[in-house]
Amino acid sequence: VKLAFVVQRYGADIAGGSELHCRDLAQRLSPRYDITVLTSCARDYVSWANAYPAGESSDGGVRVIRFAVSRPRHVPEFSSLSEEVFEGGAPHERQEEWFRQNGPQVPGLLDHLRQHGRSYDAVLFWTFRYYPSFFGVPLVRDRAVLLPTAEDDPAVHLDITEDFFNTPAAFLFLTPEEQKLVSARAGRTLTPSAVIGTGLEPAGPSPPRDLLRSNDIPEDYLLYLGRVDRNKGCHTLLEYFQEYASTSSVIPLVLAGPAKLQIPKHDRIRALGYVSDELRAALLAHARLLVVPSPYESLGIALLEAWNHGVPALVNARCDVLREQVRRANGGLHYRSFNEFSGALDYFASHPEESRVLGAQGLRFVEREYRWQTVLPKIEGLLRSLPTAPALGAAPHPI
Amino acid sequence: LATDVSVDAVMAELHDRVHRQLRERLLLHGASSALADPAVFAEVEQLLQSAVALGDAQALLLPELLGDRDSWRLRTSMRFDSHRNAQAAAVILFVKRRLLMPLVRWLFEYSRNNFERQQRVNHILFACVQELATENARLRREVQALSQNTR
């Protein structure tokens, strides 16, 4: 069985969520299927400048074909176009131009799909918003499986997405909320489809605290994990936290991730910048609580990772995905306003046993829904339903 | 471990407490005394909340009734154009885009951010009016039906 995986960037050094998801699945499924990853030569998701050599290479048994980016993204021009189309009322040609300029523009990848697309039993596309998916899906629509990784942001509400979401043969979603959002945009129930999320390995024994001590990290802390960015809701988190800290004795907030905004100087806020995988794991394992302030998420990997360590979470309720994940897992609390944020922190501080239970319930949820032995059969089940992939056997996947 | 903890139950308690504090604060600052009734407050909040949650601009009726978009809609993006002939326009647009724009970008971005916020508030106000009008129409029909039944 031949599968093609189409993704905007690919590589061991690429940190994006959908790129990691694609690579994880490629590596997990490659012992059983003939997988070819079709991707760009870009490493940077802002400029899409060519960084890897074009052509064929191998990544742990997975065949990778890279195509050169014909035109890097011109950021000011793209920003202006984004404002124009998100205002609403832009004609379809301008909306299509938005998908072109969002890049990475890889006409060679589209040529490959035109010439060889039918040689694959199924072609899986990651992320609806980028050029390879938007222009590639229609070329192989009878065997296209889209993983939209859609968030409830302005791009998903562009008029043009209604037709686009009616194009693929099948869908794989990260959460039921994403499935609902994309189905609403398509104007119908999308079948065949499956909600797969992602797979996580068990966290294993807790890393020792020594690494935290050597980095001068306090014993007890709230954790934010990821890029410290306005788009991730961090400005509101910092504002709420400072306001809360001005009236309550709160444990410190540790921010682990590169800063894209100015972090205020505050004796209860500790910004670590980029952290190693080892330190990241130790931070997760020993946190009192993970805070996820992002208003837009299609899955929330950091949230699943925290639960994988039995750590409860406090999430932004304005993001449907995060709020419903927390409710499904019974793994934390959610907030919409400062008053709810402070009320939730008060609860965690005054109910340590219940907080531990919430973390344990999160772990049970991960074990039930997000282990590879649960995720992979869902994908194979969906692929089996495609008329172009009859050779997929019914045998269970050896984990 | 202790017995299971229900997120919904904890959140319900937390919401009750936050709503009570919020209601007290609003009343203290002169809000309508009708809000002293927790049930009324909850209904008002629910109605406004559903307006705020109406995320899709295409779900709104008022913009359709306002007519020509250019006559009322905030335009947050900068358009570069010129009424001169093609050659002169190309020079003027080049100067505007490549020389003037970089100099005033900070001011443009400051204004744009505020315009975007205003646009969001307008959108929410449109949604509030729509929710209230819908509720009003529904109640009017119910009152009419009741008065017909009692005749």
Image (cartoon, rainbow, N blue to C red):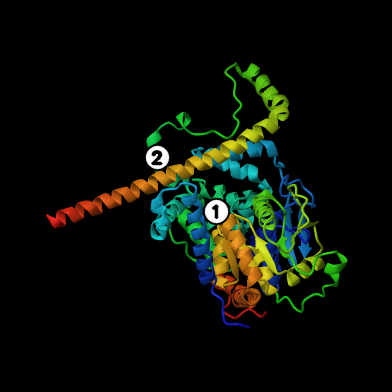
Q: Name the residue under label 2.
A: B62
| Vertical order, A162 against A325 (above or below) | above
Q: Residues within 10 Å of mark 1 (few under 14, many from 20)?
A: many
Q: Position of residue A124 (x, y in %)?
A: 61, 61
- Residue sitting at the far left: B151
Q: What element carries label 2?
A: helix
| Vertical order, B67 against B100 (above or below) | below
State whether discs 2 and 1 lie on one chain. no
Q: Where is residue A200 in the image (x, y as percent from the top left)?
A: 68, 72
Amino acid type shown at disc 2: Leu
- Can I make out residue A147 in this image? no
Q: Residue A152 carries which label?
A: 1
The chain carrying label 2 is: B
**In the picture provided, is A41 more to the left or to the right than A170?**
right
> Is label 2 or label 1 in front?
2
Amino acid type shown at disc 1: Asp
> What residue appears at the point 61 percent right and 19 percent down from the top-left corner?
B86
Quarter assignment of residue B85: top right
Image quadrant occupied by the N terminus of chain B: bottom right
The chain carrying label 1 is: A
Image quadrant occupied by the C terminus of chain B: bottom left
- Can I make out residue A250 in this image? yes
Give A125 or B34, whichever is nearer the viewer. B34
Distance of label 2 from label 1 (alpha carbons): 23 Å
Quarter assignment of residue A175: bottom right
Give A191 or A274, whichever is nearer the viewer. A274
